[in-house]
Image: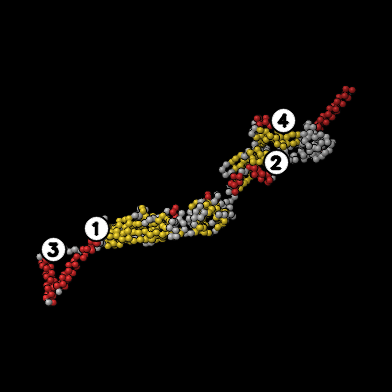
Amino acid sequence: MKKIVCFLLSLCLLSFSVPAVYAEEQSSYSYDDTTKISVTVPEYHSVTGELPDGVVLYMDGNAVDSTNVKRLSSHTFTIGNTDENNRKIDKVYVNGEDITDEITGEGYTVPSVYEDLFFTVTLGDEIVPGNLEFNSEIGENAPTLDLTPEDIQAIEDAVLTDEDRESVKNGSQINITLSVTDVGDSITDEEKSLVDALISGEFTPGEYLDIEILKTTENEETYVTQLSKEIKLTLTIPEYLRAENRTFAMVRLHDGEATLLEDLDDSADTITFRSDKFSVYVLVYADAAVLPGQDSSEPSVDFVGDVDSSTDDSDGAIADQNSNNPTDTANTGDTAPLTLLVLFLTVSAITLCLFGKKKEN
Amino acid sequence: MKKAAAVILASIITSLAVTSVSVHAEDRSTLITTTISPAFTVTIPLSVKVPFNSISTDFGSVSLDAARLESDKCVVVTLETDNTLDNKSNPDETIPYSIHDKSDDSVFVSETYISTGEKSDLSINIKQDDWNSAYAGDYEDTVTFHIQYTDK
């Protein structure tokens, strides 16, 4: 019994001391916990794009619409454009990065594909081709131009640069104006001397002309004095310079140098010459005599000063241009009126006869 | 004998009661003490799968919840990591990463928490260059959070 009592007493004492021990043990402690982090790197990456009609994406030279490429592989991309509205590629982006310069040049190379590639291509505005216009301006008293469409095409080809042609393709307007102006009043003595020295004894200056080619673009006006190649120009001889058996030529004054350009056509009413330099020109002429039996189409000198090709042949005073009649008066270049001379001689003879009779009486 | 023992025990118990009553009666003070055990919950991020090519991925938070700490104590959470994701197939291929405290973008190493609600929002950062050079495959790493209840 004593043992039981002692046990119960011990229990009572223990019940007071346990909480204090517990508190001591909880004053500092630690524990661990873990968390897992994971990631999956894909084996392939997609290559896709948002491409306008007519635009093709090429990968390593092959057209691709949508494909997959192995991660970390190398590829080169280019862009083809066959837009029917002639629009040019404006911008090319891959995943938002502007690669326009690279992909429209030698190609955009991705040395190691490490992500999906999404190409976006935008086109510029529709390009309406510009216009190339040719005009000719003929000044007062200047000879008119006689140009065929082929002549005009040749002038345009000689005047336009590659840059000009590209500019027209891209919508620019370019005007080419060929002007012929009589500059007889403003020609200098020095220029006249140059011409005279060249043609002395062979030709007579007829008309001084300034033949200019003006190229007008949207930004500037340029007088083109030197073409890339020669062009052919045909001028109509002014009426007041036309004469029977008269031949014409053109003297070009360019950079202080006078050059004689022969007439390349067979028409008496026009002069055709070729040139690639444009400045002052002088229309010169020469009159030649037609000897008896000589074809009147050959250079000749007409005895009649004022020649009208429409004048009736019946008056006998004007050589028949279409006739080889040997009885026609030879063209000596003497322009004195023959009829008046004959009349004067007749009157003189009659007067002498009358004076002779009076003396006899 | 049994009766005698019972009497003795009853006397002891009675004497204890009598003693208490007698204390009150004498206006003596009694110290009442209680001990409240410290208690707290630390929440750590769950396992996370980082999206491919993401240079900053939300990693959740480390937070101190339902905290009942002693006034001179705090909870310190320390992160242990080798900052490397290892390829499961080829451990030689790795992707470096770092865990940052989003509040100031500093690398998270450890943080001290005192009261309920305090937390650190974390992110897993992988540099773009590291993504770009990573070989294909599945990568994994395990990080350990040491939680310590300690003196301030």
Q: Which residue is mark 2?
A: A234
Residue A256 position in % (x across, y down): 64, 32
Q: Which disc, if any, is residue A200? A: 4
Query: In the image, what residue type sits under mark 1?
Result: Ser
Of badges 3 and 4, the one in the foreground is 3
In the rendered image, residue A49, in percent from the top left (x then y), is placed at: 52, 57
State the image coordinates of residue A266 (x, y, percent, origin top left): 75, 40
Q: Amino acid at mark 2?
A: Thr
Q: Could you say which disc has been placed on residue B29 in the image?
A: 3
The CA span between labels 2 and 4 is 24 Å
Do the residues indicated by labels 2 and 1 lie within the same chain of the protein? Answer: no
Indicate which disc residue B71 carries.
Answer: 1
Q: Quadrant of residue A25?
A: bottom left
Position of B67 compared to B130: left or right?
Answer: left
Do the numbered discs 2 and 3 sit on residues whose CB atoms are within 8 Å? no
Q: Mark 1 and mark 3: span between their CA atoms? A: 27 Å
The quarter of the rendered structure image containing the N terminus of chain A is: bottom left
Q: Amino acid at mark 3?
A: Ser
| Mark 2 to mark 1 CA distance (whole Å) | 114 Å
Question: Callout 2: 10 Å neighbours few (<14), some, many (20+)?
Answer: many
When the figure is inspected, residue A234 is found, relative to residue B6, above or below; the finding is: above
Q: Provide the secondary structure element on which disc 4 rests.
A: loop
Q: Nearer the viewer, mark 4 or mark 1?
A: 1
Camera-near label (2 vs 1) is: 1
Q: Chain of mark 4?
A: A
Instruction: Give the chain letter at badge 1.
Output: B
Callout 2 and callout 3 share a chain: no
Q: Position of residue B33 (x, y in %)?
A: 19, 63
Chain of the residue that carries numbered disc 2 in the rendered image: A
Q: Residues within 10 Å of mark 4 (few under 14, many from 20)?
A: few
Tell me if mark 1 has few (under 14), some (14-19) or many (20+) residues whose alpha carbon lies within 10 angstroms of its own. few
